[in-house]
Image (cartoon, grey):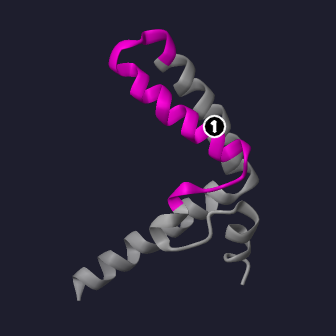
Amino acid sequence: MVRFYFCKFVWEYLMAVLQFFGSTTGRWVRVIAGIALAVIGGLLGGWWWLMALFGTLAFTSGAFDFCVPALLVKKPVNGAKFRATFTK
């Protein structure tokens, strides 16, 4: 019984985070954080380039309005369609 409530809590938390990622504010946060990660990773070099890669992914997904983590919960990746699933 405790396990079910824990899973339900995690699921609701994940959906809240994804709903934020899909919002306009979440898109801007992804764009700004992506730029910061890409610049820091590029300046530090070495293995930090991996951070630049993730920053580029975050920037691209925010700029072109698609949400990659939506694939985890089998929701549409397109931003407008993704947001429409939460308004029902």
Per the image, is 49 magenta? yes
Q: Residues within 10 Å of mark 1 (few under 14, many from 20)?
A: many
The residue lying at 42 percent from left, 73 percent from top is 11
For the C terminus, give its image quadrant.
bottom right
Residue drawn at x 53%, y 33% is: 55
What is the three-letter code of the residue carrying label 1? Phe
Dominant secondary structure (helix, strand or loop) of the stretch shown in magenta = helix
Q: Quadrant of residue 87?
A: bottom right
Question: Any magenta on residue 50?
Answer: yes
Viewer-proximal residue among 53 and 16:
53
Q: Position of residue 53 (x, y in %)?
A: 48, 31
In which quarter of the view is residue 20 placed? bottom right
- Span highlighted in magenta in the image: 42-69
Disc 1 target residue: 59
Above or below for 65 versus 87: above
Would you say 9 lies left or right of 53 here? left
Above or below, 35 relative to 71: above
Q: Secondary structure at mark 1?
A: helix
Residue at 54%, 64% in the rendered image: 70
Please state the horizontal and vertical placement of residue 58, each as a whole percent of the image: 57, 41
Q: Quadrant of the N terminus?
A: bottom left
Residue 40 left/right relative to 76: left
Label tally: 1
Residue 34, horizontal then vertical, whole percent? 59, 33
Q: From what the image shows, is residue 56 above or below residue 62?
A: above
Question: Residue at point 72% right, 70% down?
Answer: 81
In the depicted structure, whether residue 71 falls above or below residue 41: below
Q: Position of residue 49 (x, y in %)?
A: 42, 22
